[in-house]
Image (cartoon, rainbow, N blue to C red):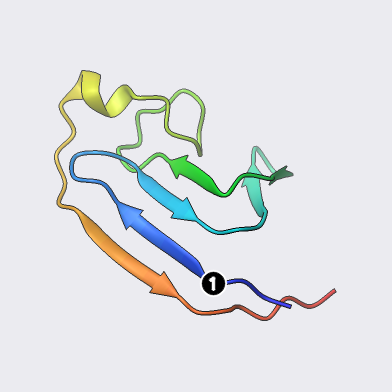
Amino acid sequence: MGYGMKIVALKNGPFVLETGGRYVIQKDGKEEVVEKPRVSLCRCGASKNQPFCDGEHKKIGFEAPAAELEVGPVPVER
């Protein structure tokens, strides 16, 4: 079963992924399971906690437009 997802790029900030489920993120070659309905991912490249946002975009003056994308259910094979 898959879940829909909303991806929001905040103005001058991170990508925010919103779902009702879990995320599997590749970090340093390892899979990390994140069980949150919302997670912020770095868009500026300066986060010291990649791939997550740690607020560095504010310190470096990162500028980028806002955007939003909704993705329908994605099939998940096990």
Q: Please state if 57 lies on the left or on the right of 73 as rendered.
A: left
Residue at image x 18%, y 33%? 62
Quarter of the image for residue 43 reads top left
Residue 15 x %, y %: 37, 48
> Given the image, on which type of amino acid does mark 1 rest?
Gly
Extreme residue in the right direction: 78
Say what secondary structure mark 1 lies in: loop
Q: Please state if 34 lies on the left or on the right of 71 as rendered.
A: right
Residue at image x 43%, y 63%? 6
Residue 11 x %, y %: 18, 45
For residue 76, above or below residue 62: below
| Total residue callouts | 1
Residue at image x 33%, y 41%? 14
Which residue is the site of mark 1?
4
Extreme residue in the top direction: 59
Q: Nearer the viewer, residue 39 or 32?
A: 39
Quarter of the image for residue 30 reads top right
Residue 27 x %, y %: 63, 40
- Quadrant of the image for the C terminus? bottom right
Residue at image x 40%, y 60%? 7
- Quadrant of the image for the N terminus? bottom right
Q: Nearer the viewer, residue 32 or 27?
A: 32
**Crowding at label 1, few (<14), some or many (≥20) Cα neighbours within 10 Å?**
some
Residue 22 x %, y %: 67, 54
For residue 78, above or below residue 28: below
